[in-house]
């Protein structure tokens, strides 16, 4: 406060991990400054080094990491030239940290109050000049902090355990634990990623209030929309470097670096419905050369990019990018079908559900009704989305549709034939007509199987004989989802998230299904990979005419891919209709609250004509 | 709260069933063992057929199997385990006398072993290589060393050479030290390995990063957070181990010439004193069942997530 010195002042931060093929430069020369009441957001895909950057500021990059910096000053303390830094005194008191997913970031065996009190207790152990605060004072401080993060009934909540709290309250408790010692800087690493959209909006409001009260926030996120609502400045991180940095509004409306531009182009809510989100994919990662790290994915790549390191260029004052091709127009993904063909919603529905109700045993002898009186029909070639927050019954609805659960009441028909309430033996022959794509393919694959055996599972027995007989078909399937058939001998653990989801889709397509039930198929993916997978779904649908039942919590994604949408809340269908109608003029207050809670990116500034054909390659 | 009581009642009932089952198996074993129990009882002393018949009627061996079983279970329900053939005393009384020293030994050995394991695991979990290697070496040695050998070694050193502790008998606390240490050494390695493994898994969890980011020191981190997570698998192991220790005192009681259930059992088996064997089986089954209930209660104390989900 007394000086204009920034609270965080970092220059040339480098973090190196030992790797099997030589050292890995996770953070490769990062500069950042952050003053009181400001918010700097670091965005990037997974593995870009954004979390490691935050952890390095706390001395928590890990035991194998080598951290160096030209300048590293935190809240006035010089951590480079000042002997061995006293990290423990710094943690919690100068820098508070909030991690993603409070379910695993709070100790499940300790009460919320004990977790929040921990920084206070740590202080009396390490602060000899302080008087030990009495237990009562600690308790008072904990309750005060819980009130400050707007937790209702703090006295009760402090005595509860993390599993007894909702996701939003847990995240508030985690924020309270980070703020209880009054650190001037808050590091928030994906603070809203696992949360429902309405809860996310409230947590973002809370962080905004903290910033307004003078806390400096370093926000780390993969979600550009989340970042846009909170940050003053945004740094885009790619392979350990800030490839672009600038004022939030300017960077989001007028991005300079090709990576930022492809990222923003991949955000579904910013593009017309049905438009392509990604450029053609390079199937293999090229060798790392001496030039720009982004060259192999860059649509604007030229020979010079591959041989010489890019320099930092100022775009405008305070907005810079690490690229030699600034100002060159970026090709937009070619829209082969400008107006997607409208499916015909008439005749016999492919799948019809009427009055579906399902309950599960709850505590004691009660029953919890998870799905109540849900009816819908799904026609061939159509994408029907089910949106809702966690616990709304989306997944149960999907499992009822798949015939994996029997409804307590109501029925499901497949092409007019009874699908629910019939013995499994009758259903089995038709099972191949419906396939399932799950959120986390890694846990839906046998980790010991190779890709070819995972796909061969769809033909019945995943033994080597099946693989041998079906080898050409497996190769064809992998090609059709944009995978190099050479990947067929890999195991799921060796693939990237996007590649795994492609394998899951290849497996689902193996039986030429009429319907794919996709349960949050892109929720675990980075935005650029998400764009590729959404494009893939569209390509597959146009090629094969498969219908999609698309479960998602992400309204941006749903608005982009779906023809019709069902909005669910606490097991009930509150609204349904064509996406344009429902999202354009929502009738139900719940739909309106969902839509208003959705963080939105500013509209891009109109650029010159984007007609240049795609060059080079994009994405993993 | 009534839910907890109902749960406890149900567990106790099922424990009673387990004990009854164990008693039945023991009875069946007794009935199926070749040889005449009456002859065993009379030993080598010459007996007229009249005497044999009299003893047989006395013990009820002239009755059909079903009647004998019914009587056996009936007596068991009143706590009567029958009379020992060898000692001519009620089995209940014999075992009651011997249970004390055995419990004392088992508890002392277990507590010592647990304390050692806690110390080893907390000081080495997630630490640098060298201390972990040293601890692992110690653990491997103790796990591999059989109890009778460790016992003899300790006896040789501390009783015969240094004369710190008495070599035999049960004469107060000093005589408990070596047997308890022997027993502790047999469990400390396994306990410490299980505990460290679970603690290291907990150390990889995000909440540990959270705690470190709050300025929690490494020792406080282990004691406040990680240790409780490590105690979960250790509790499972403990329930099994204490039960095994009760019956596994045979070797240690023999080596150190201590009184106790183990020695009584060993003697009863060699002399085919079947009522005593049955009695030990019933007591061991009861101990195992009660320990398992205790383990489940301890689980609920350690892990709050289990408290809200009573089966």
Image: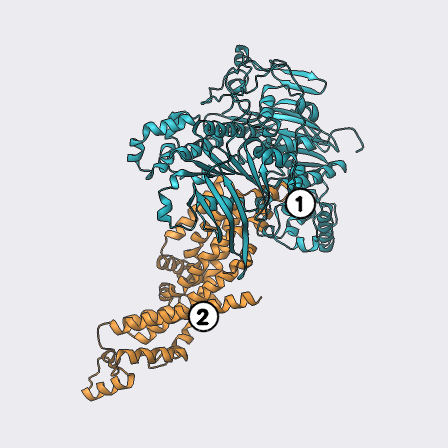
Chain colours: A cyan, B orange
Q: In this view, does A522 lie above or below B246?
A: above
The x and y percentages for residue A31 are 65, 24
Q: In this view, does A52 lie above or below A133?
A: above
As drawn, the residue found furthest toward the top would be A303
| Front one among A352 and A598 | A352
Q: How far apart are marks 2 and 1 (CA)?
A: 45 Å
Q: Is residue B143 visible?
A: yes
**Rendered image quadrant of residue A590:** top right
**Same chain for the residues under marks 2 and 1 in the image:** no
Q: Which residue is drawn at 45% across and 72% down?
A: B100
Give the residue at mark 2.
B13
Asked if marks 2 and 1 touch (Cβ < 8 Å), the reply is no
Q: Is residue A434 above or below residue B152?
A: above
Q: Residues within 10 Å of mark 2 (few under 14, many from 20)?
A: few
The x and y percentages for residue B55 are 26, 85
| Front one among A603 and A382 | A382
Left or right: B66 as drawn, with respect to A27: left
Give the residue at mark 1.
A172
Left or right: A8 as drawn, with respect to A330: right
Point out which mark residue B35 bears: none
| Front one among B248 and A311 | A311
């Amino acid at each position: 406060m007394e000086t204009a010195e920034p609270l965080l002042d970092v220059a040339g931060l480098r973090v190196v991990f030992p790797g099997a093929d030589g050292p890995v430069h996770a953070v490769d020369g990062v500069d950042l400054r952050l003053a009181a009441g400001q918010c700097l957001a670091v965005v990037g895909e997974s593995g870009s080094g954004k979390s490691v950057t935050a952890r390095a500021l706390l001395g928590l990059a890990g035991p194998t990491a080598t951290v160096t910096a030209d300048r590293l000053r935190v809240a006035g303390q010089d951590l480079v030239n000042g002997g061995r830094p006293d990290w423990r005194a710094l943690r919690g008191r100068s820098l508070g940290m909030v991690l993603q997913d409070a379910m695993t970031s709070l100790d499940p065996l300790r009460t919320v109050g004990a977790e929040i009190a921990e920084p206070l207790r740590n202080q009396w152990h390490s602060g000899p000049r302080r008087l030990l605060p009495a237990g009562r004072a600690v308790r008072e401080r904990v309750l005060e902090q819980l009130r400050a993060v707007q937790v209702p009934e703090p006295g009760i909540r402090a005595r509860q355990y993390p599993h007894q709290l909702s996701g939003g309250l847990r995240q508030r408790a985690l924020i309270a634990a980070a703020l209880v010692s009054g650190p001037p800087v808050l590091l928030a690493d994906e603070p809203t990623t696992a949360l429902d959209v309405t809860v996310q909006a409230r947590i973002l409001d809370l962080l905004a209030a903290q910033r307004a009260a003078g806390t400096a926030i370093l926000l780390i996120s993969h979600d550009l929309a989340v970042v846009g609502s909170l940050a003053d400045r945004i740094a885009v991180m790619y392979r350990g470097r800030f490839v672009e940095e600038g004022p939030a509004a300017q960077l989001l409306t007028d991005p300079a670096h090709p990576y930022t531009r492809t990222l923003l182009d991949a955000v579904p809510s910013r593009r017309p419905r049905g438009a392509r989100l990604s450029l053609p994919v390079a199937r293999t990662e090229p060798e790392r050369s001496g030039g720009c790290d982004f060259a192999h994915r860059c649509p604007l790549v030229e020979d010079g990019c591959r041989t010489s390191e890019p320099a930092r260029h100022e775009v405008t004052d305070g907005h810079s990018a690490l690229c030699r091709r600034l100002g060159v127009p970026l090709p937009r993904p070619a829209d082969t079908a400008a107006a997607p063909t409208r499916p015909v919603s008439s005749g016999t529905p492919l799948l019809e559900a009427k009055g579906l109700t399902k309950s599960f045993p709850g505590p004691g002898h009660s029953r919890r009704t998870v799905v109540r009186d849900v009816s819908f029909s799904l026609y061939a070639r159509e994408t029907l989305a089910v949106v809702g927050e966690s616990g709304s019954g989306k997944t149960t609805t999907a499992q009822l549709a798949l015939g994996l659960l029997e409804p307590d009441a109501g029925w499901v028909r497949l092409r007019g034939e009874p699908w629910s309430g019939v013995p499994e033996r009758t259903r089995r022959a038709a099972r191949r007509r419906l396939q399932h794509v799950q959120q986390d393919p890694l846990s839906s694959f046998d980790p010991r199987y190779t890709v070819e055996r995972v796909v061969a599972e769809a033909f019945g027995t995943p033994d080597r004989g099946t693989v041998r007989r079906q080898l050409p078909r497996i190769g064809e399937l992998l090609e059709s989802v944009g995978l190099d058939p050479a990947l067929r001998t890999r195991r799921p653990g060796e693939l990237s998230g996007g590649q795994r989801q492609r394998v899951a889709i290849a497996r689902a397509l193996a039986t030429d299904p009429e319907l794919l039930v996709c349960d949050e198929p892109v929720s675990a993916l980075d935005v650029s990979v998400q764009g590729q997978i959404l494009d893939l779904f569209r390509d597959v649908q146009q090629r094969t005419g498969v219908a999609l039942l698309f479960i998602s919590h992400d309204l941006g994604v749903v608005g982009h891919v779906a023809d019709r949408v069902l909005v669910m809340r606490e097991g009930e269908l509150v609204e349904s209709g064509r996406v344009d109608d429902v999202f354009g003029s929502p009738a139900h207050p719940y739909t309106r609250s969902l839509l208003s809670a959705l963080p939105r990116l500013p509209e891009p500034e109109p650029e010159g004509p984007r007609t240049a054909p795609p060059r080079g390659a994009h994405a993993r | 709260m009534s839910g907890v009581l109902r749960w406890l009642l149900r567990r106790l009932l099922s424990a009673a069933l387990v004990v009854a089952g164990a008693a039945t198996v023991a009875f069946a074993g007794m009935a199926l063992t070749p040889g005449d129990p009456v002859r065993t009882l009379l030993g080598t002393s010459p007996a007229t057929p009249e005497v044999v018949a009299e003893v047989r009627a006395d013990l009820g061996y002239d009755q059909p199997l079903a009647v004998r079983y019914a009587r056996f279970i009936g007596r068991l329900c009143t706590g009567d385990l029958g009379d020992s053939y060898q000692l001519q005393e009620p089995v209940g009384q014999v075992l009651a006398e011997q249970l004390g020293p055995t419990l004392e030994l088992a508890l002392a050995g277990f507590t010592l072993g647990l304390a050692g394991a806690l110390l080893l695991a907390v000081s080495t979990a997630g630490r640098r290589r060298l201390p972990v290697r040293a601890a692992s070496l110690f653990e491997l040695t103790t796990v591999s060393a059989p109890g009778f050998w460790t016992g003899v070694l300790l006896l040789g050193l501390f009783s015969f050479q240094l004369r710190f502790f008495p070599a035999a008998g049960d004469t107060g606390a000093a005589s408990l030290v070596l047997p308890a240490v022997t027993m502790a050494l047999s469990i400390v390695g396994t306990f410490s390995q299980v505990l460290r493994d679970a603690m290291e898994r907990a150390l990889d969890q995000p909440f540990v990063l959270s705690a470190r980011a709050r300025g929690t020191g490494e020792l406080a981190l282990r004691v406040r957070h990680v240790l409780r997570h490590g105690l979960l698998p250790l509790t499972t192991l403990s329930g099994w181990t204490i039960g095994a220790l009760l019956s596994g005192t045979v070797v240690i009681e023999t080596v150190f010439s201590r009184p106790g259930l183990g020695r009584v059992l060993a003697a009863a088996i060699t002399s085919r004193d079947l009522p005593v064997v049955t009695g030990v089986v019933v007591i061991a089954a009861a101990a195992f069942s009660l320990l398992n209930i205790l383990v489940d209660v301890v689980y609920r104390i350690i892990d709050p997530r289990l408290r809200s989900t009573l089966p």
